[in-house]
Image (cartoon, rainbow, N blue to C red):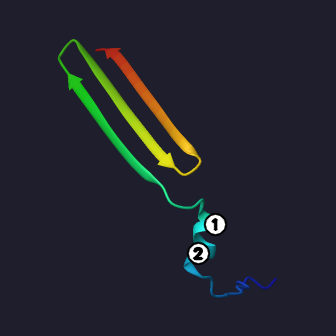
Amino acid sequence: MNFDPHIATTEISDADLDNVSGGLAVAGSGGLSIETPIASVASGLLAVATPEGVTTGLAFHAATH
């Protein structure tokens, strides 16, 4: 068997790359984590804005030890 990779390359313009990768976007995220001997709490927030709209996400996790 021949395991040599077969790779073809081509050049792509920045404008075409924006269309392939989903275009331009602005994103921000933040998180908070608190841990005590009794419990731990973690949360996170994510927001992404693109020309198509805004997407947000929130995560929360709590656990006792």
Could you tell whether 58 is left or right of 2 in the image? left
- Answer above or below: position of 31 versus 39: below
| Residue in the picture at 31% in, 26% down | 42
Q: Which mark is residue 19?
A: 1
Q: Residue at x 27, y 20 (%)?
A: 40
Question: Dividing the picture into quarters, in which one does residue 61 lie?
Answer: top left
Return the x and y of residue 65 as percentages of the image width and height: 28, 14
Residue 62, located in which quarter of the rendered image?
top left
- Mark 2 belongs to which amino acid? Ala
Residue, disc 2? 15
Observer-nearest of 8 and 6? 8
Marks 2 and 1, how far apart at CA? 7 Å
Task: Kindly check if marks 2 and 1 are in contact, taking CB atoms under 8 A apart as contact.
Answer: yes
Exactly how many numbered labels are in the figure? 2
Q: What quarter of the picture does the N terminus occupy?
A: bottom right
**Residue 44: image location, x then y, percent:** 36, 32
Closest to the observer, 34 or 18? 18
Question: What secondary structure is found at the residue carrying circle 2?
Answer: helix
Q: Is residue 7 above or below residue 53?
A: below
